[in-house]
Structures are given as structure tokens and as C-alpha cells.
Image (spheres, rainbow, N blue to C red):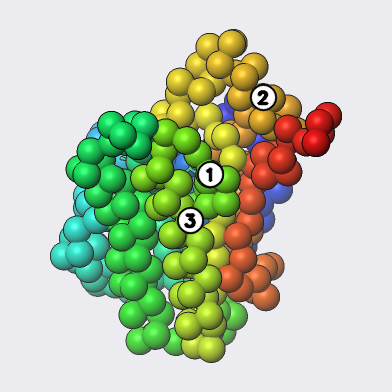
Amino acid sequence: MAGSAGGNRGVIHSQLLAGQKALVTGANSGIGKATAIALGRAGADVVVNYVVGADEAEKVVTEIEAFGVRSYAHEADVSDEEQVVQMVSRMVDELGTIDIMVANAGLQRDAPVTEMTLAQWHKVIDVNLTGQFLCARAAAKEFLRRGVVPEVSRAAGKIICMSSVHQIIPWSGHVNYASSKGGVGMMMQTLAQELAPRKIRVNAVAPGAIRTPINKDAWDTPEAEADLLRLIPYSRVGDPEDIANAVVAVASDLLDYVVGTTLYVDGGMTLFPGFATGG
Ligand code: NAD
């Protein structure tokens, strides 16, 4: 693994999540893939969800199995109620339960508002917001059925919503995406409030600009990257591993008292960098 985040490999204790069962949606690409691998490295068994790209999903499974934990790939569309229910039910059958749900799958369908079709609006809301609701609901049901197992974790379960800096930063030309992530923020807080008394921790991780296929246009030429860096006080584009490491930490008992929080992992993008020299 190249890049600055590669050096973090040894930092994550290989037993931090030992005995836990995790599911990551959209885990055959980008942030989801890095997260699934990091969870496996930390000792969790991992279900690798994907909707297209079975080969890449199988490669992720092989990488995770090399850590000596269990893993398998599962095809499901997170915006389909029946498929999500079935995915979690298979996990309970095969791995016994679920301890960590990482609702990561997401997409963009960009257009200026006057050109945005209703189909583009619905697609993004269905996957990015409704998909996270369906995954959170299915996981919560199993967490409540099983309750806390103290040898495994202090919590009955952890739900981690993959949000975005666009949970709070408006984004012209992306009203569907920004609305979906704003919705994820409020959904996460509401679920956290509702489920915390039952010992379920719900939190969000909000990436800034991370080098993945979703935003390739923003970083794959030197000019685009220079433009992007103007928005990042820490002066580097993030790597998927930056987000994966944050998810492992939030999922672990090290952060057991963190409930209903959004952890921004963004190199300072939410610090209004335009005001560093102006305002
Ligand atoms: P990506 O395109 O590499 O990965 C997205 C994954 O979601 C893919 O595996 C894709 O197949 C999957 N997916 C899409 N629709 C699905 C569906 N209906 N069911 C199941 N899986 C589906 O992009 P990424 O950057 O890794 O994005 C992962 C998450 O991170 C998304 O929620 C995205 O909004 C968020 N995010 C990314 C960035 C960034 O800079 N890359 C920034 C902020 C937030």
C-alpha cells in the first residue's frame, strides 16, 4: 500500500475488533474497500457488500482472509428493502450475528438544478439516504435481539454512516448529493438518540476529498488537484485508508463513549479555508 496512510498499518492493533462481525456496503471500491480491509486487519470477520463488480469484491475477500479472519462477498442493492433484509439475515446465519454496520455505499448523479431529472434526484436519495436507513434498521434489529456481549464489546452494536463534508457544506450542481448527506447527518443523530439507551452507538464519519473513483475528475490532473488543494488546509488529498482508520477507531471500544457524533476526516476542509486570507 503506497502513500502517507500506508504507514499507519502497524498502528491498528490486530486484536482491536477481535471476535466482532462487520458488514461494509459498497466494499469493492474506494473507501468501502479500504474500510473492509482495515476492519479485517483489526481482527473482525467482514462481509463485503457490492452491487456490481463481483471480481473486485472477491479480491477484497481474499485480502481480508489473509488476516486469518472470515469473509465473504454478498451482492445486494442497498436501496432495495428485501435485499438488505436478506443480506443481514444471511450474515446472522453464516457468522452468527453482526456487531458493526458500515453504511458506506454511495454515488453521485450531478447536474445543475434546472437540468437535474427526478430520476437523478431519486437515485441519489435512494442509495445514499434510504440505503443507509435500511442498513441501519436491519442491523439495529439484530443488535437489539442479541444485546451486549461483554467479552465482545461494551456496546450492543455500532452503526457507522459514511457521510461527507457536504453534510454541512452546500454544493452547487450537486443538490441531490448534498441533500442526501445532510439527511444522513440528521438520520444518524436521531438514530443515536433513539438507540443509545439500548447500548447501540450510531455515529458518522465524514470524509473530505479522498482519492477514489467517485471524484476522479477532481484529482486526476495536476491542474484539478491544485484547484482541490486550495480547499484543503492540510495540503494533501486524502487516501481511502485515512477514512478506514477512522472507522476502525469509531467501531472499537476505544471510542465507546462517542455517540451521535460526526467525525470529519477532511484535512481541515470544513474550516472555511477561504477565510484563511480573507473575510
Ligand atoms: P466509490 O465509487 O469508489 O465507491 C462507492 C461504492 O458504493 C461502490 O462500491 C459502488 O458500487 C457502491 N454502490 C453504489 N450504489 C450501490 C448500491 N445501490 N448498493 C450497494 N452498493 C452500491 O466511491 P467512494 O469515494 O469510495 O465512496 C464511498 C462513500 O464515501 C460514499 O458514501 C461517498 O458519498 C462517501 N464520500 C466520498 C468522498 C470522496 O472524496 N471520495 C468524500 C465524501 C464522502
Q: Earlier in the sequence, mark 3 or mark 2?
A: 3
Q: Seen in the image, is 11 located left or right of residue 21? A: right
Specify the label residue 182 is tagged with.
3
Specify the label residue 170 is tagged with.
1
Distance from disc 3 to disc 1, alpha carbons, whole Å, reads: 9 Å
Label 3 packing within 10 angstroms: few (<14), some (14-19), many (20+)? many
Identify residue type, mark 3.
Answer: Gly
State the image coordinates of residue 19 (x, y, percent, origin top left): 49, 68
Q: Earlier in the sequence, mark 3 or mark 1?
A: 1
Q: Residue at x 60, y 60 (%)?
A: 262
| Vertical arrangement, residue 22 with respect to residue 126, above or below | below
Label 2 packing within 10 angstroms: few (<14), some (14-19), many (20+)? some
State the image coordinates of residue 33 (x, y, percent, origin top left): 43, 42
Residue on which disc 2 sits: 229
Mark 3 vs mark 1: in front: 1
| Vertical arrangement, residue 106 with respect to residue 150, above or below | above
Q: Quadrant of residue 110?
A: top left
Q: Quadrant of the N terminus?
A: top right
Q: Seen in the image, is 10 located left or right of residue 139? A: right
Residue 52 visible in rendering: no
Identify residue type, mark 2.
Answer: Leu
Element at label 2: helix
